[in-house]
Image (cartoon, grey):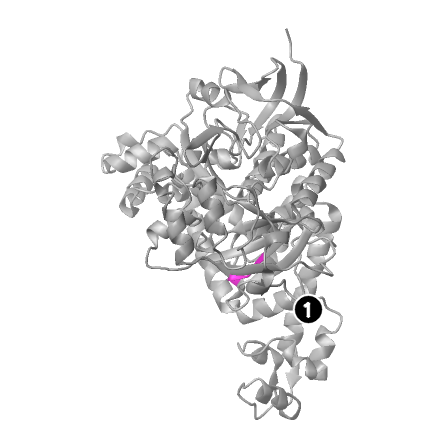
Amino acid sequence: MGFFKEYDVIVVGAGHAGCEAAHASAKLGSKTLLITLNMNNIAQMSCNPAVGGIAKGQIVREIDALGGMMGIVTDETMIQSKMLNRSKGPAMWSPRAQSDRMMFAASWRTKLEQNENVDFWQDMVTDVLVKGDTITGVKTQLGLEFGGKAVILTNGTFLNGLIHIGNKNFGGGRAAERASTGLTASLEQIGFQSGRMKTGTPPRVDARSLDFTKMEEQPGDPTPPTFSYTNTKPLSKQRSCWLTYTNSEVHDILKTGFDRSPMFTGRIQGLGPRYCPSIEDKIDRFSQRNRHQIFVEPEGWNTVEVYVNGFSTSLPEDVQYKALQKITGFEHAKMFRPGYAIEYDFFPPTQLTHTLETKQIEGLFFAGQINGTTGYEEAGAQGIISGINAHLKAHKTKESFILGRDQAYIGVLIDDLITKGTEEPYRMFTSRAEYRILLRQDNADHRLTPLGYDIGLADKSRYENVQKKHTDVQTIINEFKNTSVHPNVINPILKEKKSALIKQKIKAYGLALRPQLTLNDLRKDPFIDRILINQTDEVIEQAEILMKYEGYISKEQDMANKLKKIDTIKIKSDFNYSVIKTLSAEAIQKLSSIQPTNLGQASRISGVSPSDISNIMIYLEKK
């Protein structure tokens, strides 16, 4: 019997990775099938109803710059928006939005349904179909076989998912949703290695039962930022979040459940994220602290459901409830559902190439939490890259779409995963990027939209907007270099800002470099105001960053250019490292396992020393 139906690209899973993957492949022209366990749960925000944050906000802007949808969907459904880290340098500025959970999922589904190249099927995928070392399709629980020239697995936490609450555990991929079974065994039979990871979520409570007067209000920014470089509208009204704290009484109650904690009793085998520990883990690890922050986050415009950020737990539900009611403002809290931990299968990402295609099976791609990552943003980033490359694979295009570490946080993310692997849920931080002054949130469109336009994902209007923005920014910089300011006009401004006065005319560019001054501070000078009068805030901000940080940016770009040279030294995938007798045993083992495609990637593998790289380079030069 033949295939039930055939497609260019099949995407398994409709979370944040799956949605971006399906959108990208379909928009590029591939006939795409999106298979999900439940059509009503497309693009669910399984954990907190928020997008962005430190480094994550940069990733969302990069997805948008390439032509992806996460930024647009977030802008259309946000209830609060902030730019984090404004007190630090621009490399650290990160947009973050609180989202309406139900609107976010509904908007994503609508976007996918509006793409005629996307078909949907509600079912469980239990097997991948392979001929030789090439993917041919998937088989579902109903026994149907779908043919696909490329297949992307984005199974999230559903692969053999096991939910833990105290001594209780039961199968599930998310609260009230069944786990996905069979696929792990199918992949292992082919020869893939798998592991177990763990994540968790806090209880949800009824806002009507909380006393917000006892908490600290956390409003959004007066001028709320957007994620998308398109003309999405900024928020005109916002909902506040709230801040409160645990206390010693809360901690004492939680400790009474430690003997029933699946984390402490060893029932959970998977490794959880260090940077986002459960409340019981925080109490255990940081016993000297008598309180921890609790962020109270509304889940939408028209719901009373609240997300208790900072109280992730898998303790028994009765212990959770008692402890919650000892938090300031939570004295009469009503719980909608308890927090829980979830264990799930993942596949170490060193089994992938930079396109997110598996090394073993041609045409099979992995994206999202199946690769050991955590976070909507990291998943969406992998989704768009896998979707692009699956489309290229399906149409037998020789080119592949790969972003470098100096081009995008997405490039850092994927290179880290396939080169270093991960033993705990991987989360992006700005510290992971060597070139973070180059990878700012304000210039993601300049970095990536031309690339998205070239492959056909970003439309012409996006490309033209980037070109205009670049021209406008350069115009401001050139005007500042050529415009003089007079002491009589500018000194009152400098005095007000406690900046050194000038004794004679100087170029405006020199004043723009002063850390105490912004370009808008200088607009009281009519000549400077003339330069800025018709420019957008976004253009003015980027021009200011490029002027103030010109030296840092130039230095980092030079460093990136130098280090990129070793990325051009290619290594064959079947290279036998054992012939180089001067390599350490660990280096031979790691290099043979990961099979780096170039010397630059080899240099980033844990356990491979600079002397090992020198020895490989010498050997390659001789050959």
Say left or right for 59 vs 571. Answer: right
Q: Residue at x 63, y 62 (%)?
A: 220
Is residue 124 shown above or below 595?
above
Q: Is residue 368 visible?
A: yes
Is residue 411 shown above or below 243?
above
Q: Give, as a three-letter code, the residue at label 1.
A: Thr
Q: Residue furthest front?
A: 332
Residue situated in front as seen by the camera: 474 or 21: 21
Dot 1 falls on a residue whose secondary structure is: helix
Q: Quadrant of residue 104?
A: top right
Q: Residue at x 72, y 60 (%)?
A: 237
| Residue labelled with disc 1 | 475
Coordinates of residue 50 in the picture (x, y in percent): 59, 50
Say left or right for 324 vs 26. Answer: left
Q: Residue at x 58, y 17 (%)?
A: 141
Q: Residue furthest top?
A: 1
Coordinates of residue 63 in the picture (x, y in percent): 61, 46
Magenta stretch holds residue 384? no
Residue situated in front as seen by the camera: 323 or 614: 323
Quadrant holding the C terminus = top left
- Give the magenta-colored segment's residue range: 91-95
Q: Is residue 396 visible?
A: no
Quadrant holding the N terminus = top right
Residue situated in front as seen by the camera: 483 or 85: 85
Number of numbered tags placed on the structure image: 1
Coordinates of residue 255 in the picture (x, y in percent): 36, 47
Q: Quadrant of residue 510?
A: bottom right
Coordinates of residue 164 in the picture (x, y in percent): 45, 34
Magenta stretch holds residue 92? yes
Q: Residues within 10 Å of mark 1 (few under 14, many from 20)?
A: some
